[in-house]
Image (cartoon, rainbow, N blue to C red):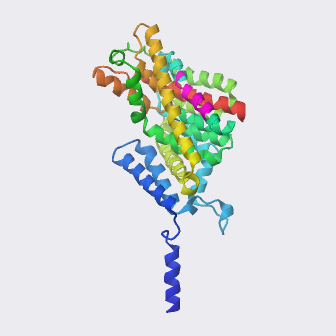
Amino acid sequence: MNNIGDILNNLLHQTAFLNLTGGNYLMIAVACVFLYFAIAKKCEPLLLVPIAFGMLLVNIYPDIIAEPSSTSNGVGGLLYYFYQLDEWSILPSLIFLGVGAMTDFGPLIANPISFLLGAAAQFGIFAAYFLAIALGFNDKAAAAISIIGGADGPTSIFLAGKLGQSSLMGPIAVAAYSYMSLVPFIQRPIMKLLTTKEERSIKMENLRPVSKKEKIIFPIVVTIIVCLLLPTTAPLVGMLMLGNLFRESGVVRQLQETASNALMYIVVILLGTSVGASTSAEAFLNFRTLEIVLLGAVAFAIGTAAGVLFGKLLCHITHGKINPLIGSAGVSAVPMAARVSQKVGAEEDPTNFLLMHAMGPNVAGVIGTAIAAGCFMAIFG
């Protein structure tokens, strides 16, 4: 009987119920809320489902992300090895390869003024940097946190790893991806607040056709110019442009299809679950995490507002030829931010099609956020 009692006692202590803290249960509840928004409300499920499930797993079984040095057999947890791919900048770079293979750069080429709108939206990044410094973060931590304002999860992870801010990578990544998922909810009220009904109703002229030669030359030229000026951006900008060259060259269709489909989705699974697994209660539930999440929200809001306000300036300069709404797409959330511009414009006039016009600033925002990260690496790396 004693043996049976020992066995039952051992089994009881092997369950998670006796090993979890109140913080773990809170994070499990948060993970379930994220899953609800992803599945029931369809808030970017490709991002939120793996992130939320990784959050769920690590708070039920923390050893799933345990380092090899902390285990008896010297083998780390499953998600530890996924997370190493984040720290080594492998997964963020592969995400950029897939984004490049999926994205048409034609609207940006057809309307080069989009570069200015994309640049204006990066103002939120630098505003967040100074706010983070004011809150007591050091230079490198402030730089890593500020990139959240670009609504670019891969770049946020990439920069945090390069600047040695691994301890902040979890909160930074979760904040960045959460804001990417919540783009429609955050941007829409800001866009309506800063524009008039007349401005939102502006119809823009059709973009000029872009030749295949232009589309092939563009990624090559951007790679040469940007990477010569900021070599540290090569992993991100280089992969983004390589993916786009796969798409536009027309001679490597298999590579383009692999990068934009199978490889992209595999990387999203690995990246999402590992990001979610970085949110154990012990690592995530602290005041610093709250500051990071709030700084990210402020940065994203400022970036959106800066893009819209610069769009209003261009609208005035061009005598009403540019709809200010497309300026909000200057953040890096492709293509969600462009879709929001289209939706808000269509609410005023269902015949107003802004999507392709908004894709220009949106693509420029991806490049701009990578350049901002390169600037921080050049200064603090």
Residue numbers of the magenta segment: 120-131
Q: Is residue 308 above or below residue 77?
A: above
Residue appearing at x 66%, y 31% in the figure: 376
**Total marks in image:** 0
Residue appearing at x 41%, y 45% in the figure: 45
Q: Does the segment drawn in magenta span residue 126?
A: yes
Indicate the position of residue 39 as horizontal and vertical percent values.
36, 48
- Tell me, yes or no, if residue 209 can be seen here: yes
Q: Is residue 28 left or right of residue 154?
A: left
Indicate the position of residue 32 as horizontal and vertical percent values.
41, 54
Residue appearing at x 62%, y 38% in the figure: 135
Q: Residue furthest bottom?
A: 1
Indicate the position of residue 262 as horizontal and vertical percent values.
47, 44
Q: Nearer the viewer, residue 192 or 375?
A: 192
Indicate the position of residue 119 as horizontal and vertical percent values.
55, 22
Q: Nearer the viewer, residue 73 or 209?
A: 73
Q: Nearer the viewer, residue 241 or 318?
A: 318
Q: Is residue 272 above or below residue 78?
A: above
- Tell me, yes or no, if residue 210 can be seen here: no
Q: Is residue 225 above or below residue 259?
A: above
Secondary structure mainly formed by the magenta segment: helix
